[in-house]
Every structure is written in C-alpha cells, then in structure tokens.
Amino acid sequence: MMRGGNREMRRMMDKMGLDMNELSNVQEVIIKTDKKEIIIAKPSVTEMKAKDNSIFTVTADSYEEKELEVPIFSEEDIQLVSLQSGVDEEKARIALEEAKGDLAKAILNLTSA
C-alpha cells in the first residue's frame, strides 16, 4: 500500500493523464449479451478517463442473471444462414430462433427440409 494515500494516488493519476470520478445515484447497470442479461442493482460505479477513452468499474454486492428467451442474433449470423441455406433473411431468422442461436443446426434444418 502507498504512503500518503489518496493524495499521492491522485498525483500519480494526474501525471499519467487520468481523471477518476465516482458516478453518483446509479440505480442499475445492465450488461446484455446475445444469450443473457446481467442486472446489477445499486452498484458503485467509477469512471476513469484517459485521453479518448473511459474505463468504468462496477462494484456490487449481488447481481441477477436472466437467460433471454429469444437470443439476439447479429446481422452477420442471419446473412450467413441465409446464404448457406439459400433462403431469405426472414426464414433464416426464424430458423435461428428455433435452433436457439446454433448456426449449424439452423442451416441443417433449412437444407434438410
């Protein structure tokens, strides 16, 4: 641990061009992936700014994970299934939903039907 505590840490961060701020009154943070959501209620969020970038640190006692009923597919996934199986993008999207996001299974289901 450093002697001098926060003051010395602030000086070091200033020398590196970093600015750190605690965000107040954050109600929740939601992280979304293609298959689930992670919901963090009442977190402590700190933002560290450096030139053109920001780094957010999220700290919490607990969080909740929710599996999405219908996975989110990228346009690239839909186009790939469409091209590989020779169907339009709407049929490719439906096949991906039925296959729960499994690209190979969606293509096989469309080409074997």
Image: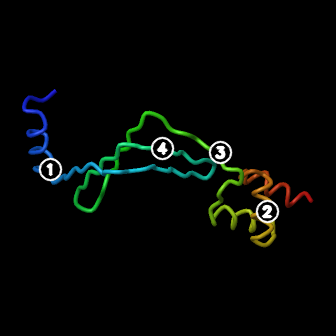
At which x and y percent is residue 6? Answer: 13, 38
In the depicted structure, whether residue 94 falls above or below residue 15: below
Give the mark nearer the N terminus: 2 vs 1.
Answer: 1
At which x and y percent is residue 4? Answer: 7, 32
Give the mark nearer the N terminus: 4 vs 2.
Answer: 4
Tell me, yes or no, whether the two marked residues, 2 and 1, touch with CB atoms within 8 Å: no
Residue type highlighted by circle 2: Ile
Compute the Cα span from label 3 to label 4.
15 Å
- Disc 4 secondary structure class: strand
Tell me the colour scheme of the image.
rainbow
Q: Name the residue under label 3.
A: 67
Which label lies toward us, 3 or 4?
4
Closer to the camera in the image, 14 or 25: 25
Residue type highlighted by circle 3: Glu
Picture quarter containing residue 103?
bottom right
Which label lies toward us, 1 or 3?
3
Compute the Cα span from label 1 to label 3.
40 Å
Q: Which residue reaches farthest right? A: 113
Residue at point 34% right, 46% down? Answer: 45
Give the mark nearer the N terminus: 1 vs 4.
Answer: 1
